[in-house]
Image: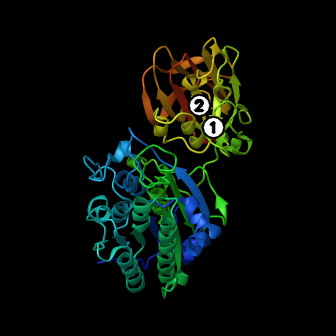
Amino acid sequence: MLGTAAIAAAAGPLTGAARAAAKTPKVLVIGIDGALLNRVEEANSPALKGLMAAGVSAPSSIYANPLAPTMSGPGWATLLTGVWPDKHNAKDNAFTGHRFAEYPDFLTRIETAKPELGTLAICSWNPITDTIFSPKVDTRISTPSAEYDEGTTRRAVDKLGTTDPDAVFVHLDNVDHAGHDHGAASRQYLDAIEGADAQVGRIMEAVKSRATYGEEDWLFLVTTDHGHTDAGGHGGSSWAERQTFLIATGSGLGAGVVRHDVKMPDVAATALAHLGIPLDPAWNLDGRPLQQPTPEAFDALRGQLQPPADETGIGDGVIGFTHTPPSGWSVDNSAMGSGGVTEWRGWTFTTDEFWTKAEAGQERESNVRARGVFAVADGDEWHDKSVTGTFDSTLVSPAYPVTGGARATLTYTTYYRHEGSQKGEVSVSYDDGEPQLLKVYEANVPSRVERLALRVPGTARTARFRFRYTGGNNWYWVVDQVSVTAGDGRRSAR
């Protein structure tokens, strides 16, 4: 039976004191299978557009093979567990070899952390309720196929009006079916979005009609698991198939805001944080709460990104590269060869859309842990025009404050694909002294968060880091979200 959330969740670091004292936090997540955000924007969709106007809209992108195909199984598993497929291991719609016991869904984490809270999942695609959500969830309802999204919506409206859930997930499936049957460019697909929008509106009205609504602090999240091609279908590596989004409305979120630093695993993390559940580092989540944006130096370059120069396959209107580093950073190209493709001469600051469209199908789509704008050294793409010399470029960080004699940690996300003579090197220089080698990359490294321990010399006050990539017509190296955590727990980001 659904529990009662009569007691407000404890105020965590993400909740204001006034809200915590007066209102009970609750979360509603609605998943619209196979929906494209650009088609939502084109449709007559007042409910979804109202949420976008009142909150945050975050277009995003996902992986492709070999990490996982752009299918519903891995997509919903990623959204609901807060980790990428290389952790939850759901690589198909049969969930073969999944690791949900190690990486459970967010409703199960809620039940474990705060069993007094009520959890509810109602889904048109039954494998979500049957397989991804665990039996710990208070109520799991798989809608009979004959009732489909209408039955799901009716049940959600009923439960929101007659019970007191604290965390709710609702899955609607008809947009995906329209995409398969008619293609994402069709009128039928647009009609399906408009139908889903009406159902979202009914569910939202059920929340707002609750007798206790004025005492509740609802966070509304709307998302999707993958995109669709114009002709219909998904599973491949095209940009359209890799499209996802998050629409979020609630306290502490700005109105009419567009974010580019949001990724699929953030849905679970955001829901947990809103309910005052601390994100345990031992959970090894990839998601981070939407309510706590992390300023990142490379993302500040978005307004400086340029259209293609030499690349011809990226497409009209796609803005996505610059060689100008953010304040405090620099790029040393003194040993860099000449010629080559302009976009990739030395370290480049770019986006997932621009970089993957430069050359699809070479596993650039697996760079899942970089966010927004990131730095890439891509010897492979640089060599697509005649070059002289080799690729030899060094990305140089600002001087981070450190404490002499203390320990510190250099943290960054990285993705390194290796071939032949290429090499990636990370070094540190204290107080701008002689660089000391910290890490060498000479074999494939999947997308991951790298943490390098530092032993700061007794008199040092600053640490500057160098990321040097050398090679010929080989592969690439991505670096993003560079930070230093000092011994006193401070986090210095540049």
- The residue under label 2 is 376
Q: Residue at x 36, y 80 (%)?
A: 155
- Mark 2: secondary structure: strand
Image position, residue 153 (x, y; %): 40, 77
- Mark 1: secondary structure: strand
Which residue is more in the foreground, 479 or 431? 479
In primary-sequence order, the first of circles 2 and 1 is 1
Which residue is more in the foreground, 404 or 74? 74
Answer yes or no: is residue 441 visible.
yes
Q: Residues within 10 Å of mark 2 (few under 14, many from 20)?
A: many
Which residue is more in the foreground, 53 or 388? 388
Label 2–label 1 contact, CB within 8 A: yes
Q: Residue at x 36, y 60 (%)?
A: 109
Image position, residue 468 (x, y; %): 59, 21
Answer yes or no: is residue 408 visible.
no
Q: Quadrant of the N terminus?
A: bottom left
- Relative to 110, is 411 on the left or the right? right
> How is the model colour-coded?
rainbow
In this view, 132 is above or below 200: above
Q: Amino acid at mark 2?
A: Val
- Between the residue at mark 2 and the residue at mark 1, the CA separation in whole angstroms equals 7 Å
Residue reaching furthest to the top: 389
Q: Quadrant of the C terminus?
A: top right
Please identify the quarter of the rendering in which residue 127 is found: bottom left
- The residue under label 1 is 350
Q: Residues within 10 Å of mark 1 (few under 14, many from 20)?
A: many
- Relative to 101, is 8 on the left or the right? right
Image position, residue 297 (x, y; %): 67, 40
